[in-house]
């Protein structure tokens, strides 16, 4: 996929390769922009989501999937994800293992996982992302780094935080901005192809209490897919505000709507 309209902001990134950190909503186009920028291989590309899945949560993901063997569900799960050998595929171009590992809370008969287990996995993800982002600062500087952050970056870092300040000292922070139309597209795409979602503990507790009370106040009354979509629609509004705040402290801000691909 090629970028058909190179904006002045994007052209400025190509003019002199240096350390870059892309931030913005999940699905907004950070990976596509990274691929376009790095066609020459001038950068060392780092995907935080891929690092979380293939390195920092690798053991937890494999343990969770291997536990399904005793239930006779391992083969069908791998086939569902389009993966023949989970261990070999864990670091490749799919976040399906991480998405499946994080799961959706609710009725297990409808594909959900028990809420306390869901919270535990969310906590693992939080620590993995914190570690992955902080480890960017220790990467060898012999080649410029092009880092693609996760959609939950805004949940963990705010302007003025020590880690964000350190990142800003090393990296050119490039923010991809969304508009209303793009947000609706992100929601529609989430319905078709869910991505890994991390919730701050306070928001997750608030959403779960509110939704489960309406559903019947029992975990088994909660349809996991309906809860996931309902909570994602609320979360995306919260994240817009958080990323907007970070964009004010970014070095370059690019409207994702101006990036056209073919």
Image: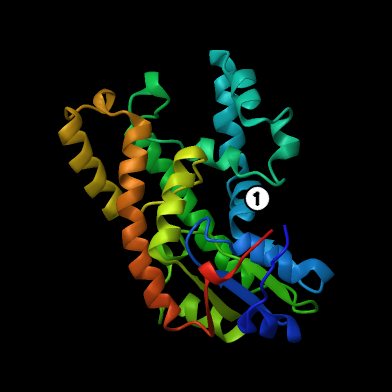
Residue 163 at x, y = what percent?
Answer: 49, 75
Disc 1: which residue: 55
In the image, what residue occupies the spot 60% across and 51% down? 56
In the image, what residue occupies the spot 38% across and 18% down? 109
Choose top left, top right, bottom left or bottom right for residue 159. Answer: bottom left
Residues 233 and 120: in front is 233
Residue 79 at x, y = what percent?
Answer: 65, 24
Residues 61 and 37: in front is 37
Q: In this picture, is 180 found above or below 138?
A: above
Choose top left, top right, bottom left or bottom right for residue 259. Answer: bottom right
Residue 205 seen by the camera: yes
Please tell me how crowded label 1 is: few (under 14), some (14-19), or many (20+) other residues with Cα within 10 Å: some
Residue 172 at x, y = what percent?
Answer: 60, 82
Q: In this picture, is 224 found above or below 230?
A: above
In the image, what residue occupies the spot 38% across and 62% down? 180
Residue 17 seen by the camera: no
Dot 1: what SS?
A: helix
Quadrant for the N terminus, please.
bottom right
């Amino acid at each position: 996929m090629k970028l058909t309209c190179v904006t002045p902001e994007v052209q400025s990134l190509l003019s002199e390769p240096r350390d870059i950190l892309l931030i913005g909503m999940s699905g907004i186009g950070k990976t596509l922009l990274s691929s376009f920028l790095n066609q020459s291989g001038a950068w060392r590309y780092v995907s935080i989501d891929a690092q979380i899945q293939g390195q920092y949560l690798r053991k937890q993901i494999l343990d969770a999937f291997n536990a399904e063997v005793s239930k006779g569900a391992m083969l069908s799960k791998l086939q569902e994800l389009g993966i023949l050998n989970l261990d070999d595929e864990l670091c490749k171009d799919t976040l399906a293992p991480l998405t499946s590992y994080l799961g959706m809370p609710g009725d297990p008969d409808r594909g959900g996982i028990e809420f306390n287990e869901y919270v535990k996995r969310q906590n693992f993800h939080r620590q993995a992302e914190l570690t992955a982002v902080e480890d960017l600062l220790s990467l060898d500087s012999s080649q410029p780094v092009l880092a693609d952050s996760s959609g939950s970056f805004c949940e963990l870092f705010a302007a003025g935080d020590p880690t964000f300040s350190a990142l800003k000292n090393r990296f050119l922070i490039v923010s991809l901005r969304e508009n209303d139309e793009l947000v609706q597209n992100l929601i529609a795409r989430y319905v078709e192809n869910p991505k890994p979602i991390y919730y701050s503990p306070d928001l997750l507790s608030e959403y779960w209490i509110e939704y489960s009370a309406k559903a019947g106040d029992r975990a088994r009354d909660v349809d996991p897919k309906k809860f996931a979509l309902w909570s994602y629609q609320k979360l995306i509004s919260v994240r817009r505000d958080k990323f907007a705040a970070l964009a004010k402290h970014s070095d370059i801000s690019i409207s994702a709507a101006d990036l056209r691909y073919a």
